[in-house]
Image: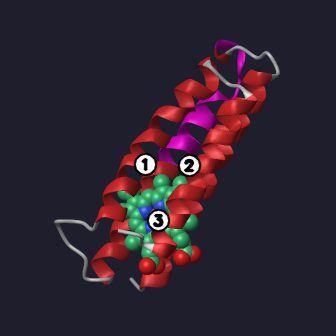
């Protein structure tokens, strides 16, 4: 597959992950309890599929770019961010706040900065 196809997969995964996190946070900040959310399965699947697409697209691009282990520093940190995004859904239900909302978008900005500027 062409690198741009992997990039579209990567970006689609990010969008899906952020939709799931945003939806869960809006619900939770509005006072909703996870157990009462009728569509929590849809949110969980969106989050999981989104993260999978981020990984598939990310590693697809790395292969096409000829980058193998040991990964450059910016990829190591992006992988760490991917794990953090994996934990955010639980936090979105349990500890949602405007602070978590801002932290989430700052983490996204950090991942974009690392990918595009490759500072290390
Ligand atoms: C396992 C984790 C990840 C890997 C291996 C990975 C890998 C990559 C690679 C190889 C690129 C292309 C860089 C280039 O064009 O030179 C990229 C771009 C990008 N990544 Fe990731 N990434 C990961 C996680 C994430 C996460 C968690 C986010 C955001 C939440 C993210 C956001 C982006 C963005 C915004 C771009 C720029 C796309 C563009 O050029 O338009 N990545 N990533």
Expressed as whole percent of the image width and height from the top left, the position of residue 73 reads: 30, 63
Residue 114, labelled with which disc? 3
Based on the picture, tell me whether residue 56 belongs to the magenta stretch. no
Q: Most prominent secondary structure in the magenta stretch?
A: helix
Q: Is mark 1 within 8 Å of ligand 1?
A: yes
Foreground residue among 56 and 99? 99
Name above or below for residue 59 compared with residue 83: below
Residue lying at 25% horizontally and 82% vertically, measured from the top left: 66
Q: Is mark 3 within 8 Å of ligand 1?
A: yes
Measure the alpha-carbon separation of dots 1 and 3: 13 Å
Q: Mark 2 or mark 1, which has the lower sequence index?
A: 1
Badge 3, how many Cα within 10 Å: few under 14, some, many 20+?
Answer: some
Q: Label 2: which residue?
A: 107
Q: Which residues are magenta?
A: 35-49
- The answer to the question of whether label 2 and label 3 lie on touching residues, with beta carbons closer than 8 A, is no
- Mark closer to the observer (1, 3): 3
- Disc 2 Cβ-to-ligand 1 distance below 8 Å: yes
Residue behind mark 1: 82
| SS at badge 2 | helix
- In this view, the residue farthest toward the left is 69
Looking at the image, is mark 1 or mark 3 earlier in the sequence? 1
**Dot 2 surroundings within 10 Å: few (below 14), some, or many (20 or more)?**
some
């Amino acid at each position: 597959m062409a690198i741009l196809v992997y990039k579209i997969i990567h970006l689609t995964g990010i969008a899906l992950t952020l939709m799931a996190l945003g939806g869960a946070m809006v619900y939770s900040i509005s006072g909703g309890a996870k157990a009462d959310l009728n569509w929590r399965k849809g949110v969980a699947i969106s989050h999981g599929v989104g993260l999978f697409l981020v990984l598939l697209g990310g590693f697809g691009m790395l292969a096409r770019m000829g980058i193998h282990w040991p990964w450059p520093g910016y990829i190591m940190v992006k992988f760490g961010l991917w794990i953090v995004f994996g934990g955010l859904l639980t936090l979105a239900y349990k500890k949602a706040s405007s602070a978590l909302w801002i932290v989430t978008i700052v983490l996204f900005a950090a991942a974009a900065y690392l990918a595009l500027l490759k500072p290390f």
